[in-house]
Image (cartoon, rainbow, N blue to C red):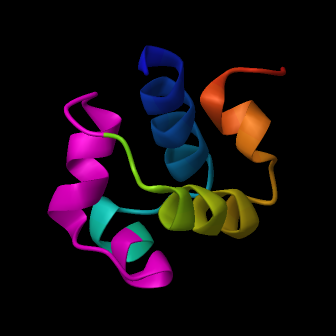
Amino acid sequence: MKIFSERLKELRLEEQLSVQDLGKAIGVSHAAISRWENGLRVPNIIYLVALAKFFKVSTDYLCGLED
């Protein structure tokens, strides 16, 4: 879960997005994004796929299964 949190935040910052902007882009609250980035929660599969599509990376990359 730590790798997911780190990669999500890294990708968001690379795109110069706020948590609010990312939340709006994929249809979740900014609080959800914040909880994911802080390792307090993990997204369900629908949002995991939405994040991967948004950032144009694989779900395996987000989950730390590939570099």
Drawn side of residue 23 relative to residue 41, left or right: right
Query: Where does the C terminus fall, quadrant-wise?
Result: top right
Residue 19 image point, x, y percent: 31, 60
Q: Is residue 37 left or right of residue 48?
A: left
Q: How many marks?
A: 0
| Residue 15 placement: quadrant | bottom right
Query: Is residue 40 covered in magenta?
Result: yes
Q: At 76% from the left edge and 35% from the top edge, which residue is drawn?
A: 60
Above or below for 25 versus 5: below
Magenta segment: does it hold 31?
yes
Please state, as top left, top right, bottom left or bottom right, where the N terminus lies in the image.
top left
Q: Quadrant of residue 44?
A: bottom left
Residue 37 quadrant: top left
Q: Residue at x 74, y 67 (%)?
A: 53
Q: Is residue 41 left or right of residue 51?
A: left
Check the image and report above or below for 15 versus 42: below
**Magenta stretch, main secondary structure class:** helix
Residue 32 percent location from the top left of the image: 23, 58
Query: Residue 30, how many percent across, how many down?
Result: 22, 66
**Residue drawn at 30 percent across, 55 percent down:** 33
Compared with 46, 15 (above or below) is above
**Which portion, as a residue range, is magenta?**
23-41
Up the image or down, 38 lies above or below 59; here it is above
Locate residue 45, reporting x and y percent.
54, 57
